[in-house]
Image: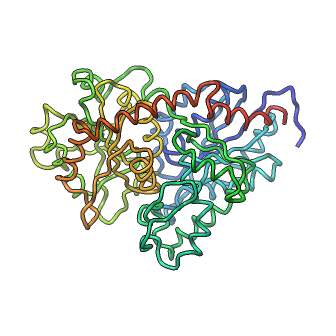
Amino acid sequence: MEHNTSLQPHVIIMPSPGMGHLIPVTEFAKRLVLDHGFSATLIIANQTNSPFKAVKQALELNSLPNSINTIFLPPVDISDSEIEAQMSATVTRSLPALAESIRAITASHRVVSFVCDLFSTESIAIANEFDIDAYIFSTSTAMLLCLCYHLPKLDKTYSCEFRDVPEMIQIPGCVPIWGIDLLRPLRDRKTETYASVIHYWKKLSLGKGIFINSFEEIEHGAIEALNGKQWDNPPVYPIGPLIRTTGVHNDGSDESGCLKWLDNQSQGSVLFVSFGSGGTLSGEQLTELALGLEMSEQKFLWFFTSPTPSGKAANASYLCAQNSVDPSGVLPKGFLDRTQNSGLVVSSWGPQIQILEHGSTGGFLTHCGWNSTLESIVHGVPLIAFPLFAEQTMNAVMLTNDMKVAIRPKPVKNGIIGRDEICKVVKELMEGEEGKRLRSKMEELKCAATSTLAEAGSSAIAFAKAVKAWKNY
């Protein structure tokens, strides 16, 4: 493809659906434009029942730099796909529309690179058709990427299910992990989902390079393994932490009243409770969580979402619009009245960034999604690890056993974490000696997160190194 070098270099970026992917990829586009002089187009695939308005609001598309364009592809039907395969299915079924968009963009722009998400690697074939170099952006950890490359060896090493392996599994460069804590789609190797994961991960070597939303100071061993000779993978560029610098509402509004409520609480006294944009709990687990919070007698701010429908997985609502529900009809009888002086339950989505940076917030009970984890690190808030799906259990292991910035409650045999256990870990985080140690360690990581993005920081240097060649393309 011939290029007019007088035109501004342009990058086409295709994230996977789901807020956990869209948000960091959008931040990646901002850095390209604001720090490195590129222009960019975000091409976003949709499914038929996606929360379109919520996506546009959460990404704050109206406030993006003028050099970033956004294209929403026509929605596709993925109702016949398993939950774990829906992201990749959305992308795969959108490839014809993607090709048309790229054709239009290349007619008027000097396109120097195509960047796709970890679950959008099928789109690399379209970039190749237009002779555009493709790169991959992983919105999760270096540990997950190490697992991607090490999985073929694990697959040959163990004949049983990974959850039945009697010893901890060692992934090069990473903290040892029990098989039960590996990525959830890997827990049953006989399923279509497992085969699909293997299929997509094999395509990771098709990119010229891989960006990861992590940084040296928290994942040195894994990053070193990825850039060593452990596997035949493209160069890996740790460029994180890329997080939103504002919340959902950047106009200072506080529709839920949670920020005003926080203003009236003591320094570091409030436990923030949220399971992300797509995570839900069963009715039984909701009850145990509520009663555990009440028993702890600690202040709490809880972003409440509807319970998981019976028979559905915790991630069943990840790509769907969630309907708000009256908490009083779901939570234990009298709970809201009994905790009205100690807690605030909010049934609408709120400004998570502003909550984490608020002085009254002293802890975060989280699903361990990587965006929320990085936001906690940047703002120095210690964690209670409450993973639900995807790679969140792996993140929980890393946060507790490696970084040592989280407490992880122990479930009973049926997988439910009981009220007594929840009460114990909440009190320990908010007023115990272990909580003090975690808070001190998190402050260290907060400083590291700031320094790594500075001009001479490791992430800033890695970002500049990766995109330098694009400018001369």
120 and 467: which one is in front? Answer: 467
Residue 421: x and y in percent read 21, 53
Residue at image position (62%, 58%) is 93
What percent of the width, then of the height, locates residue 218?
A: 51, 41
* Snapshot colouring: rainbow
Q: Which residue is at a point 13% across and 43% down the rendered structure image?
A: 335
- Is any atom of residue 89 visible in this view? no
Q: Is 144 displayed left or right of 206 in the figure? A: left
Rendered location of residue 7, percent (x, y): 82, 27
Residue 234 versus residue 248: which sits nearer the camera? 234
Q: Is residue 147 above or below residue 240?
A: below
Q: Nearer the viewer, residue 209 or 135?
A: 209
Quarter where residue 2 is shown: top right
Q: Is residue 245 visible?
A: yes
> Residue 165 location in percent, x, y?
44, 73
Name the side, left or right, on which 437 lies relative to 31: left
State which quadrant residue 240 falls in: top right
Residue sitting at 72 percent across and 44 percent down? 114
- Which residue occupies the extreme bottom position in the image? 159
Q: Indicate the quadrant containing the N terminus: top left, top right, bottom left or bottom right.
A: top right
- In the image, taking residue 327 as reference, residue 381 lies left or right, namely right
Left or right: 103 in relation to 386: right
Relative depth, front residue between 196 and 378: 378
Name the quarter where the C terminus is drawn: top right
Examine the rendered structure and indicate whether residue 378 appears above or below residue 181: above
The residue sitting at 48% across, 78% down in the picture is 160
How many numbered discs?
A: 0
